[in-house]
Image (cartoon, rainbow, N blue to C red):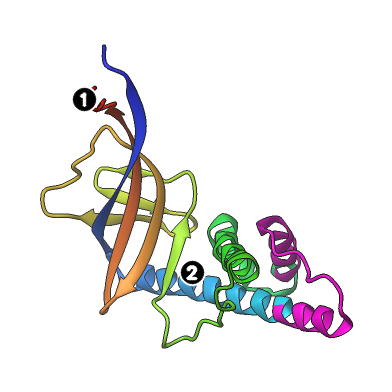
């Protein structure tokens, strides 16, 4: 029996909300992610500026420390608990990565996301459920997926999903983990 390894494949689907209320909920979830990104970025930028002026070490930019700030923000903003905790908090994973790239690799600082300039999107980091051609979005519900040719990896396990809106159409990029045989080079 040949050896196998875990391989990951991304498949892009059209996401069909099915109703205007579902489309509004998707837009609201993407807006909540943008709000959290901007609020935490403003706090972090201010703390970084103060530390730099005082000649101190910059504040922590780990996902854990940003997550603690998110929990405090969630308690103060009354409408934020209406949206999925895990989905909105995962936005800060991208921000933590951007800050680390700024400090370690000399990349540019993370920027604020505007309502009009950025692509509305969010990531479902875990517990991705795809059944009968539908994707489950936490606190929103199941939404239909369409792709010409269907799912090329029916035995794959959905690991992560990113929902985006591009040119007025919704898309879901689902990452599947699957077992692939090991291909050995000629020796």
Instruction: Looking at this view, name the residue that lies furthest to the left.
Output: 149
* Percent position of residue 65, x then y: 74, 60
Callout 2 touching callout 1 (CB < 8 Å): no
Q: Which residues are magenta?
A: 45-73
Q: Residue at coordinates 51% horizontally, 81% vertically from top-left?
A: 113
Q: Write down the residue under mark 2.
A: 29
Is 23 placed above or below 177 here? below
From the viewer's perspective, tell me whether residue 92 is left or right of residue 147: right
Question: Is 46 above or below relative to 29?
Answer: below
Residue 91, quarter of the rendered image? bottom right
| Most distant residue in the front direction | 187
Mark 1 lies on a secondary structure that is loop
Q: Is residue 55 magenta?
A: yes
Q: Is residue 65 above or below residue 45?
A: above
What residue sits right under mark 1 in the picture?
Answer: 186
Q: Of the two numbered discs 2 and 1 on the same chain, state the one appearing first in sequence.
A: 2
Q: At numbered mark 2, what does the secondary structure look like: helix, strand or loop? A: helix
User: Going 24% across and 57% down the picture, which residue do you hit?
Assistant: 13
The answer to which quarter of the image holds residue 118 is bottom left
Question: How many numbered circles are shown?
Answer: 2
* Nearest the eye: 8 or 57: 57
Q: Is residue 150 left or right of residue 185?
A: left
Q: Main secondary structure of the magenta part?
A: helix
Task: Give above or below for 112 relative to 99.
Answer: below
Task: Sort mark 1 into few (<14), some (14-19) or many (20+) by Cα contacts within 10 Å.
Answer: few
Q: Quadrant of the N terminus?
A: top left
């Amino acid at each position: 029996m040949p050896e196998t390894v875990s391989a990951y494949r991304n498949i892009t689907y059209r996401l069909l909300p099915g109703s205007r209320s579902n489309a509004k909920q998707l837009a609201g979830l993407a807006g909540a992610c943008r709000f959290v990104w901007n609020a935490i970025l403003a706090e972090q930028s201010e703390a970084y500026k103060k530390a730099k002026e005082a000649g101190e070490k910059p504040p922590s930019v780990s996902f854990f420390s940003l997550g603690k700030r998110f929990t405090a923000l969630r308690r103060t903003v009354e409408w934020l608990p209406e949206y999925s905790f895990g989905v909105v908090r995962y936005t800060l994973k991208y921000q933590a990565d951007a800050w680390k790239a700024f400090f370690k690799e000399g990349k540019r600082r993370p920027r604020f996301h505007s309502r009009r300039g950025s692509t509305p999107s969010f990531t479902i980091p875990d517990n991705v459920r795809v059944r009968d051609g539908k994707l489950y979005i936490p606190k929103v519900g199941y939404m239909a997926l369409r792709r010409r040719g269907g799912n090329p990896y029916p035995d794959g396990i959905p690991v992560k999903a990113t929902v985006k809106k591009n040119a007025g159409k919704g898309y879901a990029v689902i990452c599947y983990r699957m077992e692939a045989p090991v291909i050995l080079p000629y020796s």
